[in-house]
């Protein structure tokens, strides 16, 4: 930490700051200029609040130097995290992974058809919501455990993996038998109790960036999962809230290369929530991969116009097909390839 | 709902939209201009997604007319909601209510002293965190149930009410015996499972606006609590996230009069989180009341420089004293008064 | 400036940074910790870009310590700037000043009536636009010099001062004979050529904060005017752009106390543009004064429903009357008073 | 326009709204539901303010249906605008165009070398600032007309075109002999007088989106240039201001496909200002083209560490080389190609 004192800071004020820094475990070096004193604290206390120094008497500004996360930092695992799934799919390696499916599981027929279409297009994961966080209590809230069972069945028929959102600690146990990957939604990125519990689970987690979360906060939330002992974590940029209303959110494509530099965790892009309008999902999917994403999470519905939720942003099966074909062309430009189509488990 | 068709919309496209509107329960009136057709849907279906109409073929734009919340709307209770607490304090009436106390309960001594100082300054509620949502897993996470007991004891000694944050469904039962009011923090404003459970409780709830929540989303979240049957709900503006970094958040003072117009629920202001810097809390507290707030929620610590969390934004006891005195002067300007100081329960 | 080097920074990298700092005029002190080196540069070079240090090899982070503005800083004139106008009105002193009038000058009758109403309500300045910056080229663009003449006549009849917006360097000369104060609109807050020219003028300037300007950028723009030699400058918070759409902008009330601390320049609030909806202007005007504003700039129209621009946010004359009466009650709470009503010049 | 009346609107209120709509030239159709009346105005008045209807008594909400811009809309020229430059380079066609060069012209040697490197990398335009808008009055402000001459000479030596920023009406005439394309910077996107003058010029203009401008406002500003008669206009996304501070701005990549749908004008991306950090420029440049950009505008400096401005975001010549090579690989994925390298004019 560095503390720059005001020009007119008294000796008493300076000493007070030094003592507080030392009490936290910092080794303090003092630089005295003609008018200003600068205090450099070296060492790494387990935790401190830089804002508290900013309001101490005589302080002009205080800066945290060390990043507040440790396990999530790139330096912890410079070669990058790779997660291997039961069917051999690897996330975080050279191959780009495609996760697709409907916003909500609506019926057996719908999810069976969705899985078929995702597999045919070349995806590796079937996504779908069984428990739905909805802004309005009057919206469709999901099929619950019945939805989980249907997803598992549909995915297995085509060799796909299952990813679905967990909203609540009590759902973790229920979900475990049916899924391959937990998804933490944007609204729960700072539900720290949930994150802590997911840190104890031995199943991979994909955590979405919150709608107003900074990149640093996203990595601090990741730290909750990692520090619990679960290192199989993926991050996902899905659009942030800005003043622009032409799109549902503003997809922060630059967060992808920034995260890839700061952390060893795989980074996905979710263009469906990023823009919220079907026609703009394919260009944004291409943009995400061009910028370095390790995979894509997208909504696709056999008949988007009849979807019970998020129909406006769901791709048609034809669009998904075309998009994956384009991704196969694009991947080599960024020295990647798209993961191969999966094979049915039970044949 | 209103749907404006594109200039070149075909009859088939128009008929398709009409059929979808009717299937939702709308009674559709069609206006045909020289080049453009406008479809007005009257009636109030329980729920629909206006975005789904926006991507239908031939549609230029679709507008929801009715507000998506019902119970939270001002029309539901035009005279406004008043909540009467055990010691006779009324929120939502003519009197402005002051809630103050430390960010976290840190020790018996600290919370006993805090309660004394809050009561002396003229506050009605003791606030304090027993369970703390912290961005970093390495920060102090609260004293838990021990903190609840200490808060109850401290509050009772001075006749104060207790408000504290609930982060998790499982904490509700634990908290019930010790508190007078649940607080839902900004990070949980869209934790819908938690809100639903709080709708079943018979204790008042103060729900903070999320850091990136629109006013409409705030009212939709309120709807989760209200529709569960708990009508003793208060809202609280505590700053939103913007590009400005001179303050911790940007306190949206205008949300106060806007909410007072849209809803019957009492509206509080939290200038501590709103600005995050002690020196700016008093002017923002005055501004909130000048703009129509029904009360204030503020952090005060016996010794802010030693606080374990949020010290930078905590008032000193002297500042709280002076502020409440100013509030007593200000309240009549907006045809209000400040609630009288409380009396000890056990004398 | 402070530069924190990365843990693994080489001697060559450190030396390179030191040399660049010294070449700018910094006297560099080096603190070597166990793993990290910190370089503190003392001294005040006339200008440097801290971002350039942030990308030098081996640098972890670089911080500017000194504020990048000088003349605008509170320290330059700790007692605060007071501006005395021809009719004796003082801005920046104990009295709160009210500027009101229509968005645009529309006709002789309209502006004469407006001036009468502003004076009757107790305002000191007549505002009104002669040159209008409009988002659409198809909107009404103002009456030009004819509008200036009408404003002067109307103001003089009631002893009011004239404030109006300057959009363009070539308008400065034209305006000088008719006005008492230039207004720089939010869209021109970073029109540096215009600001530079206004620095050479000997008439006061009120500069609005840009719709996406930080407080620091606002003060840097002020520096353009001040460094040209014009010290009669006022700032004005008029709402910033955020994700919230319930109001036209989000009025950053906290910018008022923050600016009052950082700068000696008087600070106004413009609640009309801040919220954009007539009903919310009075509570926000009260909030601005409660938070420390030195004055208010507001739109009022004799018949807002017939206004050629900004009618939705213009107060009626009755509303202005009531508001000024409330302000007279409120001002003493913050140790201020409202400036007295003006007297006609020509009687 | 559509006006939805409140449930309890009186006949008088309804009639009042109808009369105002008719007075603007709308043909009004009235739909009367059980409780609510909806008024659909068909026709296209030259201009009206929808906000004024929103505050009329009895009105619940008013919606503009028609887009407020006309000449900028895709429908005006469905096939898209193509701009042919003197040396045969076409913008807006199948080929992607690269504009690169230093932020500021600093010396003859620097700009000559820059031009050589841009041409060698395969760029078509030399960019560089002769007049610089700088946040601080103490920063380097550009070489002025001398810089223009140097740019022309440098560009001609390698067959490049010249694009440079115009900040001020008086600079237009000065610039005309030396440049091929005017650039309007983000800070001037709503400098309507400047835009109007550029509408009268017969040289192409590239207009950047403002840092807080919506897509609709960007198109309205475009309308100022187009309605003046200059149809050779390009737009450029260069990052918007959000709460995220890890990057200089948040580059709104989705604005590219959205603009391509809404307007016939060519759309560029400027990743240098979009992210502000050299290392992230190449991935964002690829992302912009993957999302549909017609070209790129980027900062490159022969020695970025010594640049007088924007060094942190300037590519090295080697980076530009590699990037253009990658762009050549990427372009076919989106059915495009990169424009061929230019040839010297004077050989």
Image (cartoon, coloured by chain):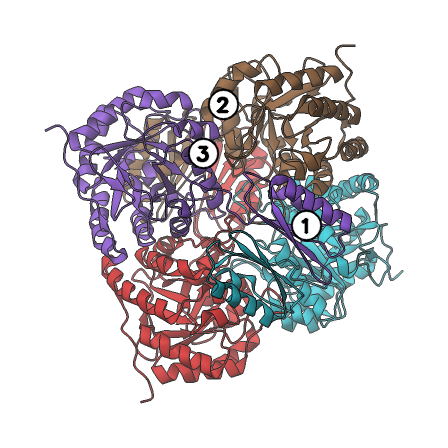
Chain colours: A purple, B brown, C cyan, D red
Of residues D307 and B15, the one drawn nearer to the viewer in this rendering = D307
Where is residue A166, by image quadrant? top left
Of residues C26 and C267, the one drawn nearer to the viewer in this rendering = C26
Instruction: Please tell me whether mark 3 sits on a helix, a strand or a loop.
Output: helix
Camera sees residue D189: no
Look at discs 2 and 1 and give the one toward the viewer: 2
Look at discs 2 and 3 and give the one toward the viewer: 3
Q: Are marks 2 and 1 in contact (CB under 8 Å)?
A: no
Question: Which residue is farthest bottom?
Answer: D347
Instruction: Give the residue at x 66% y 19%.
Output: B151
Q: How many marks?
A: 3
Question: Whole-Å distance between the Cαs marked 2 and 1?
Answer: 42 Å
Q: Which residue is mark 1?
A: C270
Of residues B143 and B301, the one drawn nearer to the viewer in this rendering = B143
The circle drawn on residue A224 is: 3
Q: Which residue is mark 2?
A: B168
Of residues D81 and D283, the one drawn nearer to the viewer in this rendering = D283
Q: Position of residue D224 (x, y in %)?
A: 49, 64
* Chain of the residue that carries numbered disc 1 in the rendered image: C
Q: Are marks 1 and 3 in contact (CB under 8 Å)?
A: no
Where is residue D157, by image quadrant? bottom left
Viewed as shown, does residue B308 lie left or right of A346?
Answer: right
Is residue C282 depicted above or below A107 in this figure? below
Instruction: Give the residue at x 18% y 37%.
Output: A119
* Chain of the residue that carries numbered disc 3 in the rendered image: A
Question: Whole-Å distance between the Cαs marked 1 and 3?
Answer: 44 Å
Is residue A319 depicted above or below C207 in this figure? above
The circle drawn on residue B211 is: none
């Amino acid at each position: 930490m560095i503390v720059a004192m005001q020009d007119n800071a008294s000796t008493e004020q300076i000493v007070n700051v030094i003592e507080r820094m030392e009490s936290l475990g910092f080794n303090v070096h003092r630089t005295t200029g003609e008018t200003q004193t600068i205090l450099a604290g070296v060492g790494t206390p387990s935790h401190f609040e830089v804002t508290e120094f900013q309001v101490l008497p005589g302080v002009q500004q205080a800066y945290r130097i060390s990043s507040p996360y440790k396990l999530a930092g790139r330096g912890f695992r410079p070669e990058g995290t790779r997660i291997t799934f039961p069917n051999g799919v690897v996330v975080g390696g050279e191959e780009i992974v495609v996760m697709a499916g409907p916003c909500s599981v609506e019926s057996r027929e719908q999810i069976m058809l969705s899985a078929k279409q995702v597999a045919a297009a070349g995806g590796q994961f079937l996504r779908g919501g069984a428990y739905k966080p909805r802004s309005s209590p009057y919206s469709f809230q999901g099929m619950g455990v019945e939805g989980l069972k249907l997803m598992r069945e549909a995915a297995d028929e085509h060799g796909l993996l299952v990813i679905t959102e967990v909203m609540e600690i009590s759902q973790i146990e229920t979900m475990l038998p049916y899924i391959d990957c937990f998804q933490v939604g944007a609204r729960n990125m700072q539900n720290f109790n949930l994150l802590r519990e997911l840190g104890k689970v031995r199943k991979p987690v994909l955590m979405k960036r919150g709608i107003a979360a900074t990149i640093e906060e996203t990595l601090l939330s990741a730290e909750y999962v990692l520090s619990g002992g679960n290192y199989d974590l993926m991050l996902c940029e899905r659009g942030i809230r800005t003043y622009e209303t032409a799109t549902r959110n503003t997809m922060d494509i630059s967060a992808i290369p920034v995260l890839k530099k700061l952390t060893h965790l795989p980074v996905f892009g979710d263009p469906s929530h990023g823009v919220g309008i079907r026609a703009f999902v394919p260009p944004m999917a291409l943009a995400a991969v061009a910028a370095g994403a390790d995979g894509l999470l997208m909504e696709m519905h056999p008949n988007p116009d009849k979807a019970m939720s998020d129909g406006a942003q769901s791709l048609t099966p034809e669009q998904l097909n075309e998009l994956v074909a384009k991704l196969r062309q694009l991947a080599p430009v960024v020295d990647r390839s798209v993961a191969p189509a999966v094979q049915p488990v039970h044949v």
